[in-house]
Amino acid sequence: MRKIHETGSSEEVLLRFALNIWGLLENCAAFSVQTHEKGLLDATMKAMKLAVASCSVETQSIIVERAYSVLSSSTSFPLKEPMAAIPIQLKGLQLTQEIDVGSSRDEWIYSLFASVVIALHPQTHIPNVRLVLHLFMTSILKGNVPAAQAVGSMVNKFGLNANGTDVSSTCTLEEAMDIIFNTSLCSFNDNGPSRIHGGMNNGSEMGLNSICHGVVNSRSLQIHAITGLAWIGKGLLMRGHEKVKDITMILIECLLSNDKKGSSPAEQESSEDISEQGVHPSVMKCASNAFQILMSDSENCLCRKFHATVRPLYKQRFYSTIMPILQSLIVKSGSSFSRSMLYRACAYIMSDTPLVVLLNDAKKVIPILMEGLSVLCSDILDKDILYSLLLVISGILTEKNGQEAVLECAHIIINHLIGLITYPHMMLVRETAIQCLVAMSRLPQARIYPMRVQVLQAISMALDDPKRAVRQEAVRCRQAWAPVASRSLHF
């Protein structure tokens, strides 16, 4: 498939491949794939996306019609029911953390249909698009990430042609957003169906916003809803739509839950009624991770390879809009855990913001970078974002205006870098921290001279690092700082 995609082979081959996959799914009534074989689904999804993305609008229309036919005839979702709003049944979700995603066959059909939608041109018509959106919303709340990516792709491309101008559509973006945020959700208990609002079974409606804020007592459901919102927000952000601000504020409100409730993570962990205590720390962490989805580049969806709409400078605009809000909330936050989650969100934003933007705001960014290092260095799961932050610091230190910005807090930066020389979870973190110390040695003597002994003592430990690349950088760093230690200050 990769060779077909790269060489631009005949669309007929790609069309036959896609239609054959859908034919197999339609004809295979007894279908079961074990958990350890999930890699087969991932590979098939990737191949389907590449095949569909390489086709013309006309060929894509044939594939999506066929996929929709299999979807509507082979799954339990009521696609043929002409309802204005389809209740999403949440039976049992309040009571368990493990959410059933349906049969293996249904999961394959949903995920592969999502793959087709992800790869479509903006001009390609999606059959019965409103009910498809309802289907994807159901799948999102069951933890189906491809469904979330598909909805993000849909809102990214709705109503646009190849050059980005508006075209007529069977479903406008505004209508799609209404479906996404105003879908009527149902909860079922032992006494039968009941609607939920504000955490109480009182016959009112409940949307994604309410789920994210914990009115349903299920962390998994909250996490799925937040992940879905993140991908939807990414689609809107990349096309420059203002609705992304509303999604961002929902995520930020989740980060501030502890501030509003005045409880610590330990108290929330021990509480039996999470809805009374606010958003659980694991859900708050998911909300901070959502900013990574918003800002990072994805190879699986919402990229030019899959015909996404990408507005120039969208990352810069998001940074300039959201960072001042987060900085203000950090100052006002009365909860150490909420503050740490705000720093995590900032870290994800800064790590994917172009360096030239950060350099223009370096004096404000550097303190947040330092606090980010402190927050992220304690958890092994944060090693990748920690490394990304170090790359940002390294970039700042190699630019002249960045070096000028770090002068006032050189000792603080050096202390944080020294602490990462022995970071046990990732060799690249140790290596990059030492490289940053080499760059710090080029600052004016008066700023770094008081730190010389501390740096050399720390570097001596790195000379015995098990990784050769770290030892080599340690030698370079010792050579760079040795002249600093041997010189005296002259005023």
Image: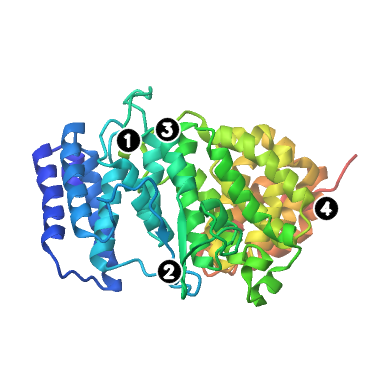
At mark 4, the secondary structure is helix
The 10 Å Cα crowd at callout 3, few under 14, some 14 to 19, many 20 or more, is: some
Where residue 141 sits: x, y (%)?
Answer: 43, 59
Name the mark on residue 307: 1
The 10 Å Cα crowd at callout 1, few under 14, some 14 to 19, many 20 or more, is: many
| Disc 2 to disc 4, C-alpha distance | 64 Å
- Quadrant containing the C terminus is top right
Return the disc, 2 or 1, that comes first in the chain's sequence.
Answer: 2
Name the mark on residue 91: 2
Return the disc, 3 or 4, that comes first in the chain's sequence.
Answer: 3
Name the mark on residue 450: 4
160 left or right of 404 in image = left
Q: What residue do we see at 46% from left, 41% from top? A: 178
- Camera-near label (2 vs 4) is 2
- Amino acid tagged 2: Lys
- Camera-near label (2 vs 1) is 2
Asked if residue 344 shows in the view, the reply is: yes
- Quick check: 241 above or below 274? above
Residue toward you, 40 or 81: 81
- Amino acid tagged 1: His
